[in-house]
């Protein structure tokens, strides 16, 4: 079982990264030669596009991190310290943009704010110049990414409770002084981790800069990597080196995040959650509610309205009129002879396969790591969680370089299997994290007890461990299914000729001008994803309540 797990992790994660590194150092590797070793490094350093790529990536990442902090920290603080009406509703609202595919959000904002867009049709003005600018790209990304800061801050403050701040108030500190010297320092590691995660997610994003960057004059490493693989002449060494550069930036951010968070946790002596008695906002109740409502409208209602308007409008030029609404775009999706139905069925099949494979592998990897009784547990842990720091475009490059060789007797390249491998690699950390948390909660004495009574390792896993962690595992698998069903960048890179997924179909409909049908598909994909996310969250909450009562 350990060898099986290590073998799968090697195929999914280690080998693609190894081939990226080899291709970056040996430009003739694809031809079976080691000639010209290290020459791509010099070529890249002298590439006139490199400064713009690095500047665009780092500037966008820093801007998104800053904007996410400015939006997420105040909202997270209010949620974590005060008893807000509809608190769980606001959490759900701010979870939706984070789970919305960024490329769909970017296309929705484009239709709403560009010249002759919905805003101009309704008000006579547009935000075309702001949208297609560096700042516009940052803002669009921020509306999708800021929830990581919001949840990091709010959950940290909810976990730490108000007990110590109350003690400070009893000893004469003002409310502001207690917050500044007690509450904020306790939440600072999680706050910093959330901001750094926002930076990492921004530099790894492909859809938003690809949709808006060309007209804004902004280039990023993700788009540069994709262009070097898509445009002739294909530059494998250049794309590999850019991929290595992007991974190094992401890993540095993750390393800094881990250093800041470390092993700092706020817990009570009994192991019970800290006192989470929240303060009433008093006279600020309605102003705070209005702020939360405006942010929810901005990040959820407006882009969703733009998406649905486009899906139901017969033509964009017809404008927002009752006689211009139609269901024909949705009807076309379910035409069995059309590309849309094929793309939908392909994505659903690949998403189901990804959920099953990552579920099995994630369960085994988490069990081996938490068990910790075998050599190589740390390596399994590193390999299983490393994809969290890998941009999708890098995974796509690695799989191309790994499997596009004649020496393989059987290769998944240029088939749907390569898409399955890419989804499994990208989404493996979800089951690993969920199952690891569940395993740590149930303790380590149940499996040994079963072994004492004659059960084999497989029997103990099947009849004791798996049933106990199954709610968490199922929730993670639902998350994997929802995300895999609309993954964009690896699908664009790896989809073989004649094969389309939901994300590729939507992207190409925009390129071809069939925007209504593309948004109809996007609305269906969104509904499926959100439904599965809600089911997963319900399962997680049910397990949490069960563990609290046990």
Image: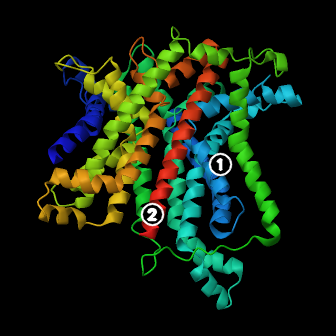
* Above or below, comparing residue 297 to residue 42 in the picture: below
Helix, strand or loop at label 1? It is: helix
The residue identified by callout 2 is 546
Side (left or right) of 364 relative to 170:
left
Q: Which of pointers 2 and 1 indicates the residue nearer the eye?
A: 2
Work out which residue is located at the far right of the displayed protein and give it: 124
Q: Earlier in the sequence, mark 2 or mark 1?
A: 1
Helix, strand or loop at label 2? It is: helix
Res 32 seen here: yes
Residue that appears at 70% across and 77% down: 176
Q: Position of residue 494 (x, y in %)?
A: 39, 22
**On the rendered image, what quadrant is the C terminus found in?**
bottom left
The residue identified by callout 1 is 93
Mark 2 Cα shell of 10 Å, populated few (<14), some (14-19), many (≥20): few
Mark 1 Cα shell of 10 Å, populated few (<14), some (14-19), many (≥20): many
Res 44 seen here: no
Q: Position of residue 334 (x, y in %)?
A: 56, 16
Q: Position of residue 61 (x, y in %)?
A: 55, 44
Residue that appears at 57% across and 74% down: 161
């Amino acid at each position: 079982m350990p060898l099986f797990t290590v073998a799968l992790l090697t195929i999914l994660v280690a080998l693609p990264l190894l081939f990226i590194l080899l291709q970056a150092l040996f430009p003739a590797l694809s031809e079976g030669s080691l000639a010209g070793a290290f020459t791509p490094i010099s070529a890249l350093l002298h590439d006139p596009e490199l400064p713009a790529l690095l500047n665009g990536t780092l500037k966008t990442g820093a801007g998104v991190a800053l904007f996410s902090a400015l939006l997420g920290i105040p909202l997270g603080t209010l949620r974590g310290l005060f008893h807000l009406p509809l608190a769980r509703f606001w959490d759900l609202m701010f979870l939706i943009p984070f789970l919305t595919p960024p490329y769909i959000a970017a296309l929705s904002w484009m239709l709403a704010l560009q010249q002759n867009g919905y805003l101009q049709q309704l008000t006579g003005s547009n935000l075309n110049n702001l949208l297609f600018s560096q700042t516009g790209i940052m803002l669009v990304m921020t509306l999708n990414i800021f929830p990581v800061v919001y949840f990091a801050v709010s959950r940290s403050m909810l976990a730490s409770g108000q007990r110590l701040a109350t003690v400070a108030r009893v000893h004469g500190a003002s409310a502001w002084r207690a917050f500044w010297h007690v509450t904020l320092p306790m939440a600072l590691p999680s706050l910093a981790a959330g901001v750094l995660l926002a930076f990492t997610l921004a530099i790894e994003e492909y859809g938003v800069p690809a949709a808006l960057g060309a007209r804004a004059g902004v280039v990023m490493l993700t788009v540069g990597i994709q262009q070097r693989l898509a445009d002739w002449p294909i530059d494998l060494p250049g794309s590999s080196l850019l991929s290595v550069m992007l991974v190094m930036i992401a890993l540095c951010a993750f390393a800094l995040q881990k250093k800041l968070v470390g092993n700092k946790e706020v817990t009570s002596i009994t192991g019970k959650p800290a006192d989470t008695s929240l303060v009433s906002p008093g006279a600020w109740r309605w102003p705070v509610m209005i702020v939360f409502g405006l942010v929810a409208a901005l990040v959820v209602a407006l882009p969703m309205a733009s998406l649905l308007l486009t899906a139901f409008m017969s033509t964009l030029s017809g404008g927002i009129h009752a006689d211009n609404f139609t269901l024909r775009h949705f009807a076309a999706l379910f035409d069995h002879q059309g590309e849309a139905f094929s793309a939908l069925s392909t994505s659903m099949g690949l998403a189901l396969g990804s959920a099953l494979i990552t579920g099995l592998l994630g369960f085994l990897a988490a069990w081996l790591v938490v068990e910790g009784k075998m050599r190589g547990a740390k390596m399994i842990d590193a390999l299983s969680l490393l994809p969290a720091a890998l941009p999708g475009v890098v995974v796509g490059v690695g799989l191309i370089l790994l499997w596009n060789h004649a020496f393989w007797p059987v290769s998944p390249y240029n088939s749907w299997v390569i898409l399955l491998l890419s989804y499994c690699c990208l989404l493996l950390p979800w089951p690993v994290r969920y199952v690891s948390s569940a395993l740590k909660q149930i303790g380590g004495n149940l499996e040994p007890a079963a072994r004492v009574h004659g059960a084999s390792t497989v029997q103990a896993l099947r009849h004791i461990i798996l049933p106990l962690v199954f709610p968490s595992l199922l929730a993670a698998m639902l998350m994997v299914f929802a995300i895999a069903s609309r993954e964009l960048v690896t699908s664009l890179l790896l989809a073989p000729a004649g094969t389309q997924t939901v994300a590729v179909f939507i992207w190409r409909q925009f390129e071809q001008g069939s925007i209504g049908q593309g948004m109809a598909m996007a609305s269906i994909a969104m509904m499926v994803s959100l439904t599965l996310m809600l089911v997963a969250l319900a399962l997680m909450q049910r397990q949490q309540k069960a563990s609290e009562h046990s």
